[in-house]
Amino acid sequence: MAKYVRSGNVGLVGILLVSALALVSGALSGVAFHLAGRYFYIVGIFPLLWGLLVGAGTAYGVRQGKCRSALIGAAAGLVAGASSYGLFQVLGNLHHRELVRAAWSGKASSDQDLDRWYDEGLSKSFGGTGFWAQLSLRAQAGISLRSHGSSGNGKSPTLTGIGVFLYWLAELAVVAGIALALPMAAAKEPFCEPCEAWYEKKDLIGIRRASLEEARSRLAAGDYSGLAACFTPDRQDGILSLEKCSRGCNGQVRVKLTAIVRDKRGKTVSRKTAFEDMVTPELAETLQRAAAGPGAPPPGGIGGAVPPFAT
Ligand SMILES: [Zn+2]
């Protein structure tokens, strides 16, 4: 019994691809969420979506760049998520300055005057005119958690001061955390070193909830013939799957048993790997035949392709 062991390898091209996709997806999402935030902003949902976008972009770089280093995947995701959120705040600062200038425009003779007033106000209250001073000004003005993108719209703020900073910090953690997790997971996927190709996953069959433990111990013992009693076409509670080299070489195959926990309404709560093992292609073939059932056509035959309403 052996688990898949990652080489941790990544080439220069891989590092460049991961970095490029991380930065591009970070920059694009930072701009997109700023622009969307000028009109509406859904607290809780937007940061999740944002982390998923940056994470998916970086994970795509991991796949394309054949990056098996979880550390590099995670670092790229973290930097991309954090800089995306930083860019969002820089754009927020610029936008806030524009709004203040627009509000004051009748009272000054020139734009230079407006900028001077703005900077003088910042220096006086926050000891500087840079990023942190502008952020502090916006925090002092407060945000409405109903739509915090458009400050200065007359709504009474939900949070002000330190509360705003804590809220921003929480958002940063969500965005950067998800952006880190996705590429890290992608880099841990099995990879065929001789072929330089990722493995492909194929679900074989469902496993009954009551039989999950039995299936696990039979798999561990290599007793594939007795497994059939655990099989069910329904893939609600457990899935038996194979992962093999996408180039179809004769390398080892990963057998995986995934246990699925659902709530009362049938929504997936969690998916947990109950068992995994690297086996020879011959053993994988035996398993595949067992899952296809007695008298079933060989894998790749017409068996799986019958339309549901065929007569
Ligand atoms: Zn291979």
Image: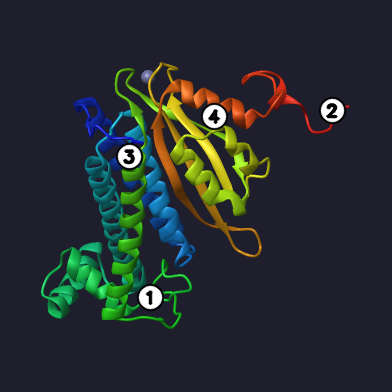
Amino acid residing under circle 4? Leu
Give whichever of discs 4 and 2 has the lower sequence position: 4
**Colour theme:** rainbow
Amino acid residing under circle 2? Ala
At horizontal 19% and vertical 63% (from top left) the residue drawn is: 131
At horizontal 15% and vertical 67% (from top left) the residue drawn is: 129
**Which element type, helix, strand or loop, lies under badge 1?**
loop
Amino acid residing under circle 1? Ile
Q: Which mark is residue 310?
A: 2
**Which element type, helix, strand or loop, lies under badge 4?**
helix
4 and 2 marks in contact (CB < 8 Å): no
Alpha carbon separation for disc pair 1 and 2: 59 Å
Q: In this rendering, does residue 237 appear at all? A: no
Q: Nearer the viewer, residue 93 or 288?
A: 288
Q: Which residue is mark 3?
A: 188
Question: In this rendering, is residue 100 above or below 291?
Answer: below
Q: Residue furthest right?
A: 311
Q: Residue furthest bottom?
A: 156
